[in-house]
Image (cartoon, coloured by chain):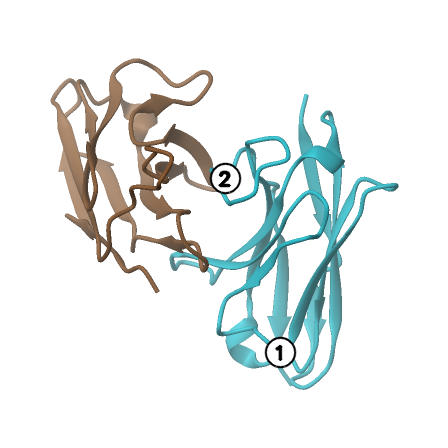
């Protein structure tokens, strides 16, 4: 199975400051079609998970442009340019290249 | 608007069975792969199973293989998860999620997710 490792696991951030979450996969997520089957999800308090970023860097519908994704192969990063109070939640990375689909442990973003 | 509504959760004794359902609306159900993902309360996400649009490809997590069966009824826009030989460690919220590429041959990304149904396995 592909293991997804996130860091940090806890991320206290002052509003208006940037934030960054890293995710590393145990195998390359690059498919023969040129896509990395990697994405980011956020689970806000009391809610179901929701898609944030897919195919490494494509923002899901309605996601503010302060969120950006980057990376390739085995190393990926989610960046928030200026954290807002509504960004509180747990952020998960996920790979869908191979079965079983696997998630990172989650990174809890909290406001200082 | 795409909607996924899970049902069928509840309290069940170890060793017994339960069948979860996910009612889909707002999209052409038989064009998309679907998934079940579970979450122990307060813990992380675990993919349970996925099924392609035509049921031609099905996958399971090792933790449920041989005990759980995913299926779909495209005539009723519904996804199912038959859970047999339930164990206390199966206690979790179970979410259904829609895959994103129509008639895709592999898993892609999940959007949206349902609100979840809680399964509690306890004597």
- In this view, the residue in front, A9 or A14, is A9
Q: Colour of chain B?
A: cyan
Quarter of the image where one finds residue B13:
bottom right
The vertical placement of A49 against B7, above or below, is above
Residue furthest out toward the right? B75
Q: Which residue is drawn at 56% across and 38% down?
A: B99
Q: Label 2: which residue? A: A47
- In this view, the residue in front, B88 or B64, is B64
Q: Label 1: which residue? A: B66
Residue B89 percent coordinates (x, y): 50, 76
Residue B119 percent coordinates (x, y): 63, 65
Q: In this view, does A53 lie to the left or right of B89?
A: left
For mark 1, name the chain: B
Residue B65 percent coordinates (x, y): 57, 74
The vertical placement of B68 against B32, above or below, is below
Q: Quadrant of the N terminus of chain A?
A: bottom left
């Amino acid at each position: 199975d592909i293991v997804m490792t996130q860091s940090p696991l806890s991320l206290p951030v002052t509003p208006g400051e940037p934030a960054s979450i890293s995710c590393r996969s145990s195998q390359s997520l690059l498919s023969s079609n040129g896509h990395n089957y990697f994405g980011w999800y956020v689970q806000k308090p009391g809610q179901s998970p929701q898609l944030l970023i897919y195919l490494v860097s494509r923002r899901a519908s309605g996601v503010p442009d302060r969120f950006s994704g980057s990376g390739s192969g085995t190393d990926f990063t989610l960046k928030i340019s200026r954290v807002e109070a509504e960004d509180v939640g747990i952020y998960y990375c996920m790979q869908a290249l191979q079965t079983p689909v696997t998630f990172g442990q989650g990174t809890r973003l909290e406001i200082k | 608007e795409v909607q996924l509504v899970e049902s069928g959760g509840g309290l069940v004794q170890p060793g017994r069975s339960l069948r979860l359902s996910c009612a889909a609306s707002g999209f052409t159900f038989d064009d998309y792969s679907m998934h079940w993902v579970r979450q122990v309360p307060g813990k992380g996400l675990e993919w349970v199973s996925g099924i392609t649009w035509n049921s031609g490809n099905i996958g399971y997590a090792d933790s449920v293989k041989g005990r759980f069966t995913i299926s779909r009824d495209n005539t009723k826009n519904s996804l199912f998860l038959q859970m047999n030989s339930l164990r206390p460690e199966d206690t979790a919220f179970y979410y259904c999620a829609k895959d994103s590429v129509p008639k895709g041959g592999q898993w892609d990304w999940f959007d949206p997710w349902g609100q979840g149904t809680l399964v509690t396995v306890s004597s």
